[in-house]
Image (cartoon, helix red, strand yellow):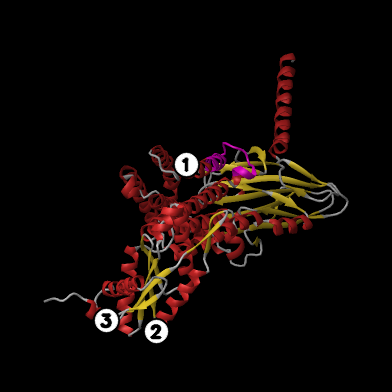
């Protein structure tokens, strides 16, 4: 009897234990609870549970049997978690029903999103959104999926949210009342729009630079910016927000990531001129470019498979481009240090984003937006490189221009020298022949200049030469050519000028020289005079040299007649003065 009672006691104890276990199991299986009070509803980081489903097509009843993991409402589960279910409960503790809005902000990059509402364990409502068939879906508000429901006073509702992604799984679940829901929808995309806007401004600026400079690196940089802007707009929902691009159509735009890498490499080859200056580095970059192009072409046929290789290729690309940048920097290229700085920003922030996508780092603005921030910082640094290179090219151009000026001008007076005069005068002679334009030549020489140097020194003589040069420059037109031929001799080519007009100009110059007064010392002022020979240019000759000879002949005549005068070349008189050939 005692043994029977003992066995009955064990049996009853086992039954009670089984009953308690059965009773407590649903309680343990309940989702985390968040309570709604009379305060505004704005749940953006609240307790949930999630599970990675082995199949994307599992039913809700199948999902319920899976083991959920406690977490917060911001998830980053990496590339292996294609199908994820989230569950949580909301309890309305007020005396009135409350309308709540459940937001899924990252719906734009998914295949599908599902909302399931249970009341007292029974399915009360279900909304499935297939992003490939999302046209005018009432629960898609721009880039976000939004589910709204009414929770009665004192009631508790359980929600399951299904996220089925193409590649990596990261998203947030937010719960709002109506006002906060409107604010959340209105406040999204401002930072992303700002990023894209800055990139668009840089794109326009660089195309304008290309049209003015025809430098191919501006084109590569602009195409890099376009690819980066498309990728940022895609990855953070701006394409869905503005253009309603979702599903497989939006997925194709992920090719912009590979295009961005390709154009960055092309920019490097152009900005560093690797083909000529760094042949080894050029071969490495060319090989890397080939791999990226192959994956890009593969992506045109199978984007999902191509993207599976993209993260590995991107990591290799970053390592190789950094290594090439270091190599070029060690070889002394001045722009390499700036490229390394910008590319390091890109590497650091992309690394943070990758660690977030793989669920190694927790959610934060920087980890979520790391790729976009990295692209922006690198783009700005590359813009600095473009501007710095333009400055370097302008300095080289200015230096070359200075050398050109020095090669064709007299260093003392700043007038053209003999070499330039002959080249320019002969060009004008050919033009004058075609259009029958009259020209004349003045040969100008300072009178008794040797005596000025001997009496007052070469420093004062140089001042006299500068004053005469300035007078000639100011008195002539832009189409005329004024040159110093050496010593105290100057030559002026008067374009579109007859002989009579040239003689009048020469006389005016002679009289203006009288007005030049230079202080020789405290007690004495120096005045100088000039003799000028004038001749017209024979348009039938092949060179300006004959006209210069005739002007010199007239100049010697002026010197012989007492200086400080103008003489016009007389062809007949020159024949009479010539020595007898017999």
Residue sitting nearer the eye, 397 or 346: 397
Q: Residue at x 37, y 59 (%)?
A: 487
Residue wearing tag 3: 573
Q: Are marks 2 and 1 in contact (CB under 8 Å)?
A: no
* Image x and y of residue 79, in percent: 51, 44
Indicate whether residue 355 is drawn in magenta. Answer: yes
User: Does 459 appear above or below 280?
Assistant: below
Q: Main secondary structure of the magenta part?
A: helix
- In the image, 109: left or right of 477? right
Residue wearing tag 1: 337
Indicate whether residue 163 is drawn in magenta. Answer: no
How far apart, in angstroms, are the residues tagged by discs 2 and 3? Answer: 18 Å
* Image x and y of residue 259, in percent: 43, 55
- Specify the quadrant that holds the C terminus: bottom left
* Image x and y of residue 342, in percent: 51, 45
How far apart, in angstroms, are the residues tagged by discs 1 and 3? Answer: 74 Å
Looking at the rendering, the stretch of residues picked out in magenta corresponds to 348-367
- Specify the quadrant that holds the N terminus: top right
Q: Residue at x 56, y 46 (%)?
A: 169
Residue wearing tag 2: 500
* Circle 1 SS class: helix
């Amino acid at each position: 009897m005692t043994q029977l009672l003992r066995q009955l006691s064990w049996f009853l104890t086992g039954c009670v234990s089984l009953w308690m276990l059965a009773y407590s199991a649903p309680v343990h299986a309940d989702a985390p609870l968040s309570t709604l009070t009379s305060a505004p509803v704005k749940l953006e980081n609240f307790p949930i549970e999630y599970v990675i489903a082995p199949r994307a097509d599992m039913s809700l009843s199948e999902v319920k049997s899976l083991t959920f993991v406690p977490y917060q409402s911001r998830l980053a589960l990496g590339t292996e978690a294609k199908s994820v279910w989230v569950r949580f409960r909301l309890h309305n503790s007020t005396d009135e029903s409350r309308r709540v809005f459940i937001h899924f902000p990252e719906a734009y990059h998914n295949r599908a999103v599902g909302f399931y509402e249970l009341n007292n364990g029974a399915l009360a409502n279900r909304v499935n959104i297939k992003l490939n068939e999302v046209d005018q879906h009432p629960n898609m508000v721009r880039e976000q999926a939004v589910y709204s429901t009414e929770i009665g006073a004192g009631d508790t509702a359980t929600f399951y949210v299904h996220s089925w992604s193409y590649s990596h799984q990261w998203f947030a679940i937010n719960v709002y009342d109506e006002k906060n829901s409107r604010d959340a929808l209105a406040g999204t995309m401002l930072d992303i729009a700002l990023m894209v806007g800055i990139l668009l401004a840089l794109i326009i600026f660089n195309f304008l630079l290309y049209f003015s400079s025809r430098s191919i690196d501006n084109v590569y940089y602009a195409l890099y910016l376009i690819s980066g802007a498309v990728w940022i707009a895609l990855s953070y929902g701006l394409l869905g927000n503005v253009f309603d691009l979702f599903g497989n159509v939006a997925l194709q735009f992920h090719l912009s990531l590979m295009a961005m890498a390709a154009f960055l490499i092309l920019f490097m080859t152009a900005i560093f001129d690797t083909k000529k200056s760094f042949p080894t580095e050029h071969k490495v970059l060319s090989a890397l470019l080939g791999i990226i192009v192959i994956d890009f072409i593969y992506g045109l046929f199978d984007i999902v498979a191509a993207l599976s290789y993209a993260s590995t290729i991107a990591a290799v690309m970053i390592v190789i481009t950094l290594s090439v940048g270091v190599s070029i920097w060690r070889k002394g290229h001045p722009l390499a240090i700036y490229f390394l700085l910008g590319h390091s920003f890109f590497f650091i922030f992309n690394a943070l984003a990758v660690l977030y996508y793989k669920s190694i780092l927790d959610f934060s603005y920087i980890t979520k937006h790391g790729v976009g921030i990295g692209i922006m910082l690198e783009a700005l640094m590359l813009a600095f490189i473009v501007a710095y290179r333009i400055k370097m090219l302008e300095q080289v151009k200015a230096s070359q221009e200075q050398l050109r000026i020095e090669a064709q001008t007299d260093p003392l007076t700043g007038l053209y020298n003999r070499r330039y005069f002959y080249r320019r005068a002969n060009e004008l002679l050919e033009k004058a022949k075609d259009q029958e334009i009259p020209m004349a030549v003045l040969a100008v020489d300072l009178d008794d200049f040797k005596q000025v140097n001997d009496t007052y020194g070469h420093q004062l003589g140089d001042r006299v030469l500068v004053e005469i040069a300035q007078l000639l420059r100011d008195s002539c037109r832009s189409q005329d050519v004024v040159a110093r031929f050496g010593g105290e001799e100057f030559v002026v080519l008067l374009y579109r000028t007859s002989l009579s007009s040239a003689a009048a100009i020469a006389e005016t110059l002679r009289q203006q020289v009288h007005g030049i007064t230079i202080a020789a010392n405290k007690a004495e002022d120096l005045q100088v005079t000039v003799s000028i020979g004038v001749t017209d240019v024979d348009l039938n000759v092949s060179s300006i040299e004959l006209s210069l000879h005739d002007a010199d002949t007239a100049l010697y005549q002026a010197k012989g007649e007492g200086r400080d005068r103008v003489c016009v070349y007389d062809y007949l008189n020159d024949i009479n003065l010539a020595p007898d050939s017999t």
